[in-house]
Image: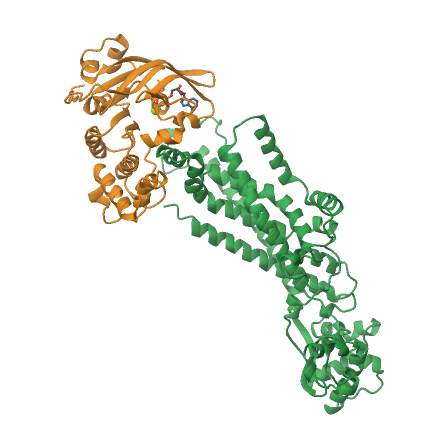
């Protein structure tokens, strides 16, 4: 930008201070231009970020609200518990088909009670207002509370069908319903009347965060519960393994290792490993942890191990930088009063490097949390409806992970999953924001460098 | 040269504390110190003077094996402390450094409280058995370092918050808290203003009653003011070593004379 070699015009220093000479004008122009470039660059970046956030939030926020049908339901004992023992093992013999009949009757009764006519609609179409998941919802509730059999539930919330939900979120219109084999305009009209009558409505949907995934036909029932647990388990594995290993490696290389060919080689390779595409670690994990070591597929332990391998170099490098930034005078001071090398490192150097190490650690963890490719290879893209068990056994149960759930939802046919995927991205972003906030707080906390 | 007040020259003892024989130091291929023979007396202030880069710091750092931390440094020859070779394979440099304390050129207090700065050495060496004993060491060390009155009300405040001169005295207090036998000081006043320098110099003179003090200085006036014996280094050689008064008034070597009259340096 600035041309230092430009020879000053002869005698230019002699001019009046009130008049800018040629060189000064040029320099000022260059400075103005450079500032402009900077502002343009930042504006582009901010615009891109804003566009990204707006598109994700506008597409994803509806996933947190869900349309529910609230109706009174009779639970006839002769249908749901013929034995009369209220033994859930016996009651479990009644399948969702049996509950579907109970629900259909309840729905018909509720519609009749509110005077909503369903003339010209088949029974299947009326049932189609509800999610295919609704019988399972009721069955799970009854099996968990056997005492309710034989009574009547005054208000029970059932998931509305995904298309009906889409209608209230603007995704489905009367026009699109005409062309849609899954829904008819008549059904939507009934849904509208039910809403007016207070039988149907949207509310915040905790199940999106807590429920497991659901099959292709039931986007309205799909949740992130298993994925969040899977991601959490993997992060625990990554943290427990990579913090001590990464810090030990960094401390050894920075403070204790003699400089020779081998440590140089290790250094170069750590830098290279940090640049290896993450999918390569997935292939490695598949070969070593699953095929060779025989660990189960789709398990958070394998995901955690793979992500640990990927994260380690990304932790070691900033940790070494943080250790290097500790002034050597502190080491001299410690050795000077007769501290051993280990004492000088652990009493003085490491505490001073801690903010940097922790920041690197959390950024590494955040990267690992968002990593998808290696997890696809070790089977974490599987369809998992059962929550993994408690720790530590749950580490070996099948699970998915947040970014993988986003990926698998975007590949599904039902348009309801687009909203779900965007909602999942929001959850992922929130977790990342929390982690970054923690990094900032930790840095502030430990950075009382007096 | 006129302000050189060559102080009392009574060397209390002639007992040699540290003896160096044929010490060579190499940094890689750079032969930084050549054939140095010195006897440092007990309870005496010994000054090392000489132009920049002549090896004063290098030799000082040999005396407590701080050069071990420099990967490229190699030390040859023998240095004995009370007759024991400190470069013997059986010697643990950590134990040595507890006996031979060091104060550095730039004040380098730990980023901890004033109290913790002083207490750290005694703690790791297990010098105290109780908190009150430790408090006692902290107090006496700060008193010896002439810092007690200034900081006694704020022992919990950070050592790095003190002024430069106070920080350096804190470092001296920290060094004497481990009860060393020898105190090495590498240009301890170079970062200080004249008043702080005067305080530290006064302190050094008091410390002489308990320790053998070795001080590196680039200021000949300072050497003249505080030391009883002076060693003049030049280009890695020990040119002349003797009573401070003799070195400054009647140098034997022409190089010493050139240096103290300001012709080299
Ligand atoms: N850590 C080091 N690595 C390599 N060379 C060094 C190191 N420290 C000092 N030297 C070299 O040793 C010589 C003596 O340095 P030094 O003892 O610091 O001199 P002084 O303290 O008298 O100014 C110089 O030539 C210097 O370049
Ligand atoms: Mg020096």
- Front residue (pair A258, A446): A258
Q: Is residue B101 visible?
A: no
| Horizontal relation, residue B66 to residue A427: left or right | left
Q: Residue at x 82, y 71 (%)?
A: A180
| A417 is higher (above) or lower (below) than A125 | above
Instruction: Pinpoint residue B197: horizontal percent, then vertical percent.
Output: 23, 32
| A213 is higher (above) or lower (below) than A70 | above
| Horizontal relation, residue A155 to residue A449: left or right | right
| B13 is higher (above) or lower (below) than A200 | above
Q: Is residue B84 visible?
A: yes
| Horizontal relation, residue A100 to residue B42: left or right | right
Instruction: Pinpoint residue A73: horizontal percent, then vertical percent.
Output: 72, 85
Q: Residue at x 24, y 33 (%)?
A: B193
- Front residue (pair B76, A153): B76
* Chain letter for the green part: A
Q: How is the image coloured?
A: by chain
Chain B: what color? orange
* Quadrant position of ligand 2: top left
Instruction: Pinpoint residue A63: horizontal percent, then vertical percent.
Output: 67, 67
| A329 is higher (above) or lower (below) than A308 | above
Instruction: Pinpoint residue A360: horizontal percent, then vertical percent.
Output: 54, 46
Tally of marks: 0
Which image quarter: residue A298? bottom right
Q: Residue at x 84, y 83 (%)?
A: A121
């Amino acid at each position: 930008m600035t041309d230092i070699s430009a020879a000053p015009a002869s005698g230019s220093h002699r001019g009046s201070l009130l008049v800018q000479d040629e060189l000064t004008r040029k320099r000022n122009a260059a400075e103005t231009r450079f500032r402009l470039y900077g502002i343009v660059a930042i504006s582009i970046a901010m615009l891109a970020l804003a566009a990204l956030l707006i598109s994700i939030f506008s597409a994803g926020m509806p996933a947190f609200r869900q349309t529910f049908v609230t109706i009174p339901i009779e639970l006839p004992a002769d249908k749901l518990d013929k034995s009369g023992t209220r033994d859930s093992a016996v009651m479990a013999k009644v399948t969702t088909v049996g509950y579907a009949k109970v629900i259909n009757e309840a729905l018909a009764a509720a519609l009749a009670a509110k005077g909503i006519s369903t003339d010209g609609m088949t029974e299947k179409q009326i049932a189609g207002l509800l999610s295919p998941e609704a019988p399972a919802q009721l069955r799970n509730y009854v099996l968990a509370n056997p005492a309710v059999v034989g009574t009547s539930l005054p208000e029970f919330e059932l998931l509305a069908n995904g298309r009906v939900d889409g209608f209230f979120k603007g995704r489905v219109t009367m026009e699109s319903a005409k062309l849609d084999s899954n829904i008819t305009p008549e059904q939507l009209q009934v849904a509208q009347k039910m809403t007016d009558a207070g039988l149907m409505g949207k509310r915040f949907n905790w199940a999106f965060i807590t429920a497991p995934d659901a099959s292709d036909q039931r986007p309205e029932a799909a949740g992130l519960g298993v994925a969040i647990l899977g991601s959490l388990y993997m992060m625990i594995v990554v943290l427990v393994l990579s913090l001590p290993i990464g810090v030990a490696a960094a401390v050894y290389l920075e403070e204790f290792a003699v400089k020779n060919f081998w440590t140089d080689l290790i250094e170069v390779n750590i830098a290279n490993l940090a640049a290896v595409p993450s999918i390569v670690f997935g292939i490695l994990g598949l070969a070593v942890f699953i095929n060779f070591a025989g660990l189960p597929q789709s398990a958070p332990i394998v995901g955690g191990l793979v992500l640990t391998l990927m994260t380690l170099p990304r932790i070691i490098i900033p940790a070494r930088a943080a250790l290097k930034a500790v002034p050597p005078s502190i080491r001299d001071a410690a050795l000077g009063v007769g501290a051993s090398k280990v004492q000088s490192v652990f009493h003085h150097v490491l505490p001073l490097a801690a903010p940097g190490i922790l920041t690197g650690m959390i950024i590494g963890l955040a990267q690992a949390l968002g990593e998808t490719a290696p997890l696809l290879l070790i089977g974490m893209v599987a369809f998992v409806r059962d929550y993994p068990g408690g720790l530590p056994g749950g580490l070996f149960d099948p699970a998915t992970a947040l970014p993988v759930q986003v990926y698998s939802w975007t590949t599904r046919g039902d348009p309801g999953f687009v909203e779900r995927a965007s909602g999942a991205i929001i959850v992922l972003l929130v977790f990342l924001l929390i982690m970054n906030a923690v990094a900032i707080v930790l840095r502030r906390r430990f950075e009382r460098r007096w | 040269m006129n302000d050189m007040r060559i102080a009392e020259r009574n060397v209390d003892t002639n007992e040699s504390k540290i003896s160096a024989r044929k010490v060579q130091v190499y940094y890689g291929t750079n032969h930084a110190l050549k054939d140095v023979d010195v006897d440092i007396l007990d309870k005496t202030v010994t000054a090392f003077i000489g132009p920049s880069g002549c090896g004063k710091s290098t030799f000082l750092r040999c005396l407590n094996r701080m050069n071990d931390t420099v990967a490229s440094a190699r030390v040859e020859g023998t240095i004995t402390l009370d007759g024991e070779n400190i470069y013997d394979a059986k010697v643990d440099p950590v134990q040595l450094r507890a006996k031979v304390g060091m104060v550095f050129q730039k004040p380098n207090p730990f980023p901890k409280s004033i109290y913790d700065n002083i207490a750290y050495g005694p703690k790791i060496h297990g010098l105290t058995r109780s908190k009150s004993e430790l408090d006692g060491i902290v107090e006496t060390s700060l008193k010896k370092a002439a810092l007690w009155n200034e900081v006694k009300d704020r022992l919990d405040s950070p050592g790095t918050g003190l002024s430069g001169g106070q920080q350096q005295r804190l470092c001296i207090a920290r060094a004497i808290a481990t009860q060393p036998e020898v105190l090495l000081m590498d240009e301890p006043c170079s970062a200080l203003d004249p008043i702080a320098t005067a305080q530290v110099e006064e302190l050094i003179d008091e410390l002489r009653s308990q320790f053998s003090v070795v001080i590196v200085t680039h200021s000949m006036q300072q050497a003249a003011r505080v030391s009883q014996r002076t060693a003049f280094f030049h280009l890695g050689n020990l040119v002349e070593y003797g009573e401070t008064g003799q070195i400054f008034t009647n140098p034997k070597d022409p190089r010493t004379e050139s240096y103290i009259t300001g012709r080299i340096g």
